[in-house]
Structure formats: C-alpha cells, structure tokens
Amino acid sequence: MTADALNDDRRIAMAFPCTDDEDEPRPIRPVVCVGVIHKEFRLPDGRYKLVLKGEGRMRITSELSMGEKLYRRAYVTPIEDEIRPSGGFGRRMHRTMLLGQLRRLARSHDCPTAELHRHLRDCCTDGSFVDLLTYSLPCSLEIKQRILETPCVDARMEQLSDELTRLTGVPTCSTAETGFSVN
C-alpha cells in the first residue's frame, strides 16, 4: 500500500474498524482521515515510518474490489467543516485554552511535542486544529472517531475540551472566567 501511494499521489486514508471481530474484511467506519505522505523512512525490515500531512475528513461512498491488492480501496467524498457563524472569537479563545491543556498534558504524559504545539498554534484551520490535536492524545480510538465524525468544528472543540479535561484533571476555563462564550 505504501509503495503504491508513494508511486502515485502519496495520499492514504486511515480508517477504523467498526468492531473487534476477527472476520475479514472487517467493516470499517464510514468517516476517514486522508493525508499526504510528507516524509517516509524505509526501515531495514521493509516497513515504513511515515510523516503525514492531514488533508481532511472524507466519507466512504463505496469500497472497490480488492482484486490483487492486499489493502482496501474506496471512493470517498470530502466532508466540509461546519462552523457557527458568530463563533470566530470564541474559537480563537477556545484554541488558546486547548493549547494550555495540551501543555499540561505534555508535562504528565509522553505526549505531543513542542513542534506539534507550534504547528497547532500557527498553521492550522480550526477543523484541522481539532483533528490533529485529537489524534495526538492518549485516548481511545472510539473517542477519536466520535470527535472526527462530528460535523461542526465548534462541537468538536467542545468534545476535545471535555477529553482534555478528563485527561489532565483540570477543566478549561468556563465562560464566567473568560467573559466570552465559545458557542
């Protein structure tokens, strides 16, 4: 799969199974992340370490026959982020609070690096910010998938905030403390 992606447009999708069943092919969740292979490192045993640049969330519309391939392929459509029209200031403040939670978490866990923190702070749209931070956290795949499948960026931020509060034991600032609303 990796060799095919590297010889084509360098894009791969990551999907989670719906169940823990051992039956193959296992059903997969309909919402996936798609990324471009930014860097690849070939390991001596033939496997790869990949650095991916996330491109977005996609919905699987149908799977293709595997044919001779040992991996699954599908037709997908992009999922556009929904945002609350009046929430721009609140989202910026919420991002700041989430980055503060990330710093707390990084001190107590083997967690995201300073490089990720800078990227999240400086280079991401609000939707990408939530998706990248969510997938960096030491939480279950179920939680990550639930957040990924939520169409509204503001609602994803709220779910992410709840998860960071659970992980750090420290709640993000409330509306009363900050004087603004994140809704």
Image (cartoon, helix red, strand yellow):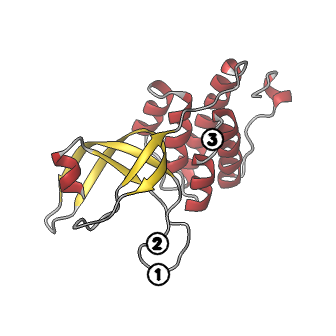
Callout count: 3
Can you say whether 168 is above or below 9 in the image? below
Which amino acid does the dot numbered 3 rest on?
Gln
Q: How crowded is mark 2: few (under 14 residues within 10 Å), some or many (20 or more)?
A: few
Which amino acid does the dot numbered 2 rest on?
Arg
Residue 100 location (% of width, % of height): 61, 36
Can you say whether 134 is above or below 27 in the image? above
Q: In which quarter of the image is residue 44?
A: bottom left
Extreme residue toward the right, this view: 176
Q: Residue at x 63, y 34 (%)?
A: 153
Whether pointer 2 and pointer 1 mark residues with C-beta atoms closer than 8 Å, the reply is yes
- How far apart are the alpha carbons under marks 3 and 2? 35 Å
Q: Which residue is drawn at 23% across and 58% down?
A: 48
Q: Mark 1 points at which residue?
A: 22
Residue 36 location (% of width, % of height): 31, 41
Q: Going from the N terminus, do you reach mark 3 or mark 1 first?
A: 1
Can you say whether 53 is above or below 87 in the image? below
Q: Name the residue under label 2.
A: 26
Report the side of 49 relative to 137 (left or right). Answer: left
Q: Can see residue 140?
A: no
Q: How crowded is mark 1: few (under 14 residues within 10 Å), some or many (20 or more)?
A: few
Report the side of 92 relative to 80 (left or right). Answer: right
Q: In which quarter of the image is the N terminus?
A: bottom left
- How far apart are the alpha carbons under marks 2 and 1? 7 Å
Which numbered mark, 3 or 1, is in the foreground of this view?
A: 1
User: In front: 93, or 132?
Assistant: 132
Q: Name the residue under label 3.
A: 101
Q: Residue at x 50, y 68 (%)?
A: 27
Q: Can see residue 35?
A: yes
Q: Quadrant of the C terminus?
A: top right
Residue 53 location (% of width, % of height): 35, 39
Q: Regarding mark 1 in the picture, which secondary structure is present there?
A: loop
